[in-house]
Amino acid sequence: FDAARNIMGALGRYCARRARSSPMEVAWWKVKESGLTLPKDVISTYLYVVGTMGMADSLGLGSARRSIGSSFSPLSDDKKESELEEEDSDSKENDKFLIPEEVATYHDLLSKPTESSMSLRIKSLASKGDAKSAEMLLEAFKKSIEADESSKELIRLRTYLPILKQYCDVGDISAALSLFKRMMTTNGVVLEPENYVLLLASIAENKYFCDDSPPIEGAHDLGYSHSSGPGLFDELASEMAADALEITSASARRLYNSLAIGFQNNSSSDSEESSAVASPLKQVHPLMTMPLTRQPANSNELVASRVALDRSTGVCPVTAAQQRLIVLEPDQRKQLHDDLLDLSTEQFKKWAGEKANHSDNPAREQLQQFSDWLDEREDEPFTAIVDGANVGYYMQSFDKGIFNYHQINFMVNTLEERGENPLVIIPNKYGNTGFFSSKGEKQRLDRTEIGIMNKLMDSGKLYRVPPGCLDDFYWMLASVSEQSASRKGKDLSVSNDDPDGRFPGTRPMLITNDQMRDHKLELLEPRLFRRWYGCHIVNYNFTAFVLGESVANNVVGFSAADFFSREIQGNECPLNTDQDEQANWRGHAWHFPVSDWDLDERFVIKIPVKDKDT
C-alpha cells in the first residue's frame, strides 16, 4: 500500500505539471478500486488537477479512451460503432462532473473543506439541475468560514456562477436576482460585465422588463424600488454602471436578442396603438455584426441599437439623449494621487534594478515633496499644468527640429492671455543649458532660450523634475492636487458660458497631446483613469516653430480630449414634442461602450415608459 500511495502521488504531481487529465481518470479509478487512503497533500494535488480537467480536455489533453469498464468489452454483433461512440460521449460528459465531485467529496471527508473543493461540488450539483441544493451547500460553507475567525478562505465568483447560470437557464428569476444581490456583497467575488449581462438578458427573456410585467417575488425585499418593468431595468443598469465600464459586442448581441424575445408580442406592426410599446427588434444570429442605426426612434419605440455618438456634443442620433462628462469625486482624486505615488515606487525599482535599496525610495519621496509643495504654497493656484516635453517637441520631427523653449514660452503666454495661471513641468535634463535631445543629438540652448528658461524658473512657472524621476507622474499628480492653501476652498472649474471666454472645464487642466497608453495599463482602477483623462486633458495645436521663428498670426487651438465619458451611463431622453400622440412617453437611454467597437460607438437600450398622469 505504501508503494501504491507513492505511485498515486507521483502520478498526481505528473498530471499537475503536464496539465494532463487522462492519467488522473485512471488513477482515481484505481484509488476507489483499492480503497487507498491518500495523504492530504496528494489529495490536494488531485483536487487541483480535476479542477482544471475541463481546461485540459479543451486543449486536447484529456482522455481519448472509452470509459473504464467498457474500454475492454468486445463489440457485440448487435451494437453499431456509432451507438458505442454515443455511449462513450455520454460517459465522458458524466465523468467530467462525476470525478471532480468524488475527489472533492473525498477531500472534504479527509480534511477541512476549502473553496476549491466546494466549488467543484457545487458545480456538479448545478450541472445536474439541482441549483437549490448547490445554493444550500454554498451558504452552509459560507457560514462555517464566517464563524471561523482564523479562516482565510474567500468565496470567489467561480463558486457562485454555476448556480446563477442554472437559475437563469430554468427561468427562476426570483432566485437568480436574490443570489446575484448576495454575490455583489460577498468579499472575494469580483463581478464581470458578462455576469450583469447574464442576469439582465435572463430577466428580459422572461418578459419582466415589460411595463405590464408581474412582479419578481422578493425584489422589494432586496432593496429595489421596482419589482419589474422599465424601472427595474434602470436600477439594475445603474448597479452595473457603478461596477463595470464596458461590454463586448457578443454581450451587446445577447442583450439585443433577449429584448427581442421579451418584447416579441409588441412588434411595430402589432402595436399601432399609442398606448403600447412598439418593438422593431427581431432576433439575429449570435455572431452577426450589428449595423449602425442613425434613424431617430419614436417616443414609444423600444431601442436596442448600435449608434455613433456625435463627437462634439455626445448626442445620440436614435434617442436624442446627451452623454455627460463625469468628473472625479474627491475620494477618487485622492485614490488616483495615491496610485501615482505607488507607481513612482515601481518605476524607480525598474529603473534602478538590482542597485535599488528597497528600504529607501527617493522617487516616491520626491513626488510626495512635490505634492506637499503644491498643497502648501499660498500664491495663486495653478489652473493649467503644461507637459513641457510634449510642447517643447511638438511638430519638431523635421531635420532642424529641437526641444524648443520658444514653443513653451508661446504656450505660457497664450494661457496667461486667456486667464490661466500655468505651471510647466519638464524632465530634469531640459533644465540644463546642454543635453541630449530625444533624437540622441547634443543640443545647446542659445542665449534667448536660456533667458526663457531662467525667466520661467524665477517666476515659479517652471518645475524641473528631480533626476531619475518620471515627469509624467508629476504633471498627472499636479492635475489632481488639492492646492489647499492657494485654492482656499474655491472651485476652480470654468463654466461653458464664462464671461471672459476662458476654455471651459475642470481645473487644473493638463495641456498635452500625450495618449498615455502605458499609464492606462498600469493604473489599478481603469475607471479613475478614464474619468481623469476625460476631465483634465486638453489637447492643443499650433504651427511649429523653426528654431526661434514662427509664422505670422500663429495661435494655439485647444480642444478637450473627451466631450463625454467613455463609461456606462443612463440619461433622460428629451420629450418628442413633434409627435403629439407620443408626447406622454418618457424613458432613460442607457449607453454601453463596447470594447471591440469604435471609441464613439455605443450600444444603446431604451425601454419607454408611458406617463400615467397624461
Image (cartoon, grey):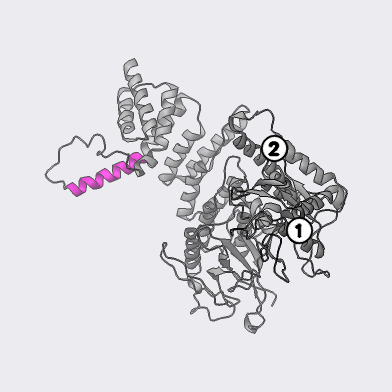
Is 86 included in the stretch rendered in magenta? yes
Can you name the residue that lies furthest to the top here? 2
Q: Earlier in the sequence, mark 2 or mark 1?
A: 2
- Does 363 appear above or below 405? above
Q: Position of residue 566 (x, y in %)?
A: 61, 60
The quarter of the picture where the N terminus appears is: top left
Q: Nearer the viewer, mark 2 or mark 1?
A: 1
| Residue 342: quadrant of the picture | top right
User: Alpha-carbon neighbours of circle 1 within 10 Å: few (<14), some, or many (≥20)?
Assistant: many
* Type of amino acid at the residue the image marks with label 2: Ala
Secondary structure state at the residue bearing disc 2: helix
User: Left of 449 or right of it: where is 177?
Assistant: left
Residue 445 at least partly seen: yes
Q: Which mark is residue 363?
A: 2
Of residue 510 and residue 255, the one placed in the foreground of this image is: 510
- The CA distance from mark 2 to mark 1 is 28 Å
Q: Position of residue 149 (x, y in %)?
A: 63, 28
Of residue 303 and residue 492, the one placed in the foreground of this image is: 492
Is 388 included in the stretch rendered in magenta? no
Query: Which residue in the structure is indicated by mark 1?
Result: 409
Identify the residue at image location x=20%, y=49%. 82
- Does 164 appear above or below 316? above
Mark 2 and mark 1 residues within 8 Å of each other at the beta carbon: no
Can you name the residue that lies furthest to the front here? 447
Magenta residues (range): 81-96
Q: How many marks?
A: 2
